[in-house]
């Protein structure tokens, strides 16, 4: 799996800081933007988002390339609606080898399970190939492909939606692959726009408690998790 931040809004913190000041300044946003420095922008973002006015960070967007991830992962990803996606098409791209599948770690480390898994995938690959050889179009042959099929997808989210995405998908209740993707995305955006992602992470990092109630994983220690995300 590869997660790469391809592009993001230029000067995301200066821009969101300007947006945060626009509602209370008599001057124009362009004047505010020209005068804005990073330290001021960061202070303003912290103050205004602290009031709960999170819409000001919607002005910064981030685009990622997610490569070699499973269809199981992207099916969960695209449930997040405040985003844009473009995914490699199974109508145009042929899937024909076992390397094109993601193997979950629980299967990878269990020799017997791995053998069963690989056998099934080989059979699927073979069936898929045979269908194509018989003139079945890719768009129909793909009906045999599993959730494990690898894919590439581009996703763009603004900072507010990303924070929400991290709340849900950096949480230990989330499935391992989308959690790995979310963790890597968070690391990369924190690096380029720290004030937009201060305290970002699973809900417990922002709230100080786990909102999952009795579904809270027993191994979760909120303080430990907070530390981990602050030092990400
Ligand atoms: C641990 C976990 C388990 C899950 N299990 C299941 C499952 O078993 N079955 C299943 O189907 N899904 C499941 N999901 C997916 C989940 O239900 C959501 O579809 C997904 O997480 C997207 O979240 P969202 O709707 O909050 O956010 P987004 O789609 O990212 O939207 C962001 C926010 O915008 C607002 N919003 C967006 N669209 C609307 C709208 N139409 N109306 C009003 N407000 C809107 C909401 O405030 C929303 O929180 C699971 C998710 C997680 C994290």
Image (cartoon, rainbow, N blue to C red):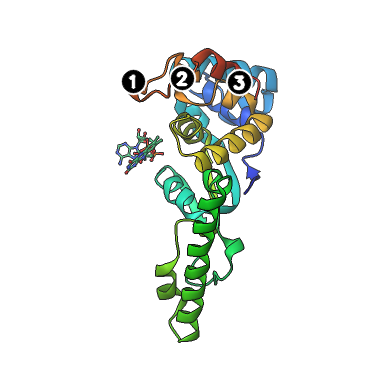
Which of the pair 137/162 is nearer the observer?
A: 137
User: In terms of secondary structure, where does tag 2 sit?
Assistant: helix
Q: Which mark is residue 228?
A: 3
Give the foreground label among 2 and 1.
1
Residue at left offset 62%, top offset 34%? 189
Q: Which residue is mark 1?
A: 213
Vertical arrangement, residue 84 with respect to residue 126, above or below: above
Give the farthest residue toward the front: 112
Give the farthest residue toward the bottom: 134
- Mark found first going from the N terminus, 2 or 3: 2
Task: Give left or right: position of 119 versus 3.
Answer: left
Label 2 vs label 1: CA separation? 11 Å
Label 3 vs label 1: CA separation? 21 Å
Task: Give left or right: position of 159 versus 34.
Answer: left
Q: Quadrant of the C terminus?
A: top right
Measuring from the top left, give residue 14's x and y in whole percent.
64, 28
Q: Which mark is residue 204?
A: 2
Q: Quadrant location of residue 229?
A: top right
Vertical arrangement, residue 47 with respect to residue 107, above or below: above
Measuring from the top left, give residue 84's x and y in whole percent.
48, 49
Query: Mark 3 touching mark 1, by CB under 8 A?
Result: no
């Amino acid at each position: 799996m590869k997660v790469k931040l391809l592009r993001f809004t230029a000067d995301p913190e200066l821009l969101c800081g300007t947006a945060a000041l626009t509602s209370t300044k008599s001057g124009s946003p362009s004047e505010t933007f020209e005068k804005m420095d990073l330290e001021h922008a960061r202070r303003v973002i912290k103050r205004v988002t602290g009031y709960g006015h999170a819409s000001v960070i919607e002005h910064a967007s981030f685009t990622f390339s997610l490569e070699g991830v499973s269809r199981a992962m992207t099916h969960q990803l695209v449930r997040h609606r405040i985003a844009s996606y473009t995914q490699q098409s199974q109508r145009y791209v042929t899937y024909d080898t076992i390397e094109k599948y993601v193997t979950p770690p629980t299967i990878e480390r269990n020799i017997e399970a791995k053998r069963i898994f690989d056998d099934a995938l080989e059979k699927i690959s073979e069936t898929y190939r045979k269908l194509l050889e018989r003139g079945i179009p890719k768009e129909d042959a793909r009906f045999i492909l599993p959730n494990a099929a690898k894919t590439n997808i581009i996703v763009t989210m603004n900072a507010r939606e990303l924070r929400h995405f991290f709340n849900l998908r950096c949480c230990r209740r989330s499935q391992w692959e989308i959690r790995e993707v979310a963790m890597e995305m968070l690391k990369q955006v924190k690096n380029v726009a720290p004030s937009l992602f201060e305290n970002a992470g699973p809900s417990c990092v922002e709230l100080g408690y786990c909102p999952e109630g009795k579904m809270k994983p027993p191994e979760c220690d909120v303080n430990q998790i907070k530390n981990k995300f602050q030092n990400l």
